[in-house]
Image: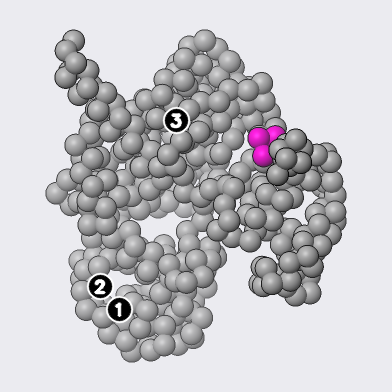
Amino acid sequence: MSSLANQLVRAEKEEIARAIRTLLRRPLISQHDDPAAFDLIRKRRQPLIQWFDYFCGWRLVVEPRQGYARLIKVRTEPSATRPARRRRATRAPFDRRRYTLLCLCAAELLTSPVTTIGMLARRVVHAAAVEAEVPAFDPVRGEERAAFVDALNLLEHHGAIIAMDGATDAYLDDEEAKVLYRVDTTRVIRLLAAPVPPSRIGSGSWDALTTEARYGGDEPTETQRNLWARHSLIRRLLDEPVVYRDELTPDQWAYAASLPGRRIVRRAAEEAGFVLEERAEGFLLVDTDATATDTRFPDDGSHAKVAALLMLDLLVSSGPVTAARLDAEATQLLRRFPLWARAYQSDEGGPRLAADALEVLTMFGLARRTGDRVAALPAAARYRVDPAVQEDS
């Protein structure tokens, strides 16, 4: 093969790997918001579709004419680590009310390609009234309008609706605000990533919503068990910062420990541009250029992450400690730096900071709380402060 041909093959592999990591970070990519990323995905859509289907069992939908790509990710288990967030300044996670209004809005938007914020609000009022288990929606109340606006802002962010006249946030202060929307009904439908449509399960459980027929249900064949083990293991590797051996099912661990399974996991990591770290305790995928990374650690972007890094050294060096010890450490930290972390400089600020820091450590697979005790997990060792380095500095 000529040098030019080698360069073209290498360039193609690098583009596919970059597109995979881009989709893992942003499962819905619009041509309008990121034309370069969308063009790359459109260009390499066939190998991308095949990669996600083979290694993860996830479906990738690329719509060149409508200008979006949607990776339909399905989790084997529910997780609260990636909530929808409000698009306003606080970036607070959605609560139950906002998720409810988001679903009601999405359902009502499917009926018309054009609507106004007032018409949609009235339709949501009616839809909530006829559902016995859904609280009534009252747009006269300011907190209800705020939740409604947060749901609409998220739909706007994903391109499901476009404000052609007016601004959605105007509805916060004025129930009579005029906003005209164009609705992309296809994109509204694509927002839902579930193998079984909710309308088919009635009041069924999470298991009924996420059941994937390809794995054989209660009586899978050997081939289907292996397929589930491959997909579920690689999904976890791609979605979670660290995957520990004691968190895997027997089938998943048997697959990971087998020669064919290990070869496939390594191939998946290589083709996606990750560095696979294999340890006795488990696995970790390193994204060296952070293309697939939606949140980082260490990171001085939040007080909780800074406190988490400081507390991690205590957990690694002192072994399991009580939650009260972490509260005391956080309180002492706030006293040492009275001008830092002003949001926590109040009564009970130390325990709140410790709780938020522990949430960070748990999310990154670095610590685990069992009862009243908190212990560092194996991956935390990489953040240990080297005493020799500390003395030299």
Q: Amino acid at mark 1?
A: Ala
For image coordinates 30% across by 30% down, the residue present is 14
| Residue 290 vertical position relative to residue 228 in the rendered view, above or below | below
Residue 370 percent location from the top left of the image: 79, 44
Give me the residue at 41% from left, 45% from top: 25
From what the image shows, is residue 382 above or below residue 128? above
Q: What numbered label is drawn on residue 163?
A: 2
User: What residue span does the magenta drawing correspond to?
Assistant: 380-384
Label 3 sits on a secondary structure element that is loop
Q: Is residue 315 above or below residue 358?
A: above
Question: What is the three-letter code of the residue carrying label 2?
Answer: Ala
| Mark before the other along the chain sequence, 3 or 1 | 1
Question: Are the two marked residues, 2 and 1, in contact with CB atoms closer than 8 angstroms?
Answer: yes
C-alpha separation, residue under disc 3 versus residue under disc 1: 41 Å
The Cα–Cα distance between marks 3 and 2, rounded to whole angstroms, is 39 Å
Residue found at the very far left of the displayed protein: 65
* Percent position of residue 390, x then y: 73, 42
Question: Which residue is denoted by mark 3 in the rendering?
Answer: 274
Magenta span main SS: helix
**Residue drawn at point x = 74 percent, y = 50 percent:** 311
Can see residue 302? yes
Look at the numbered disc 1 and give the secondary structure of its residue: loop
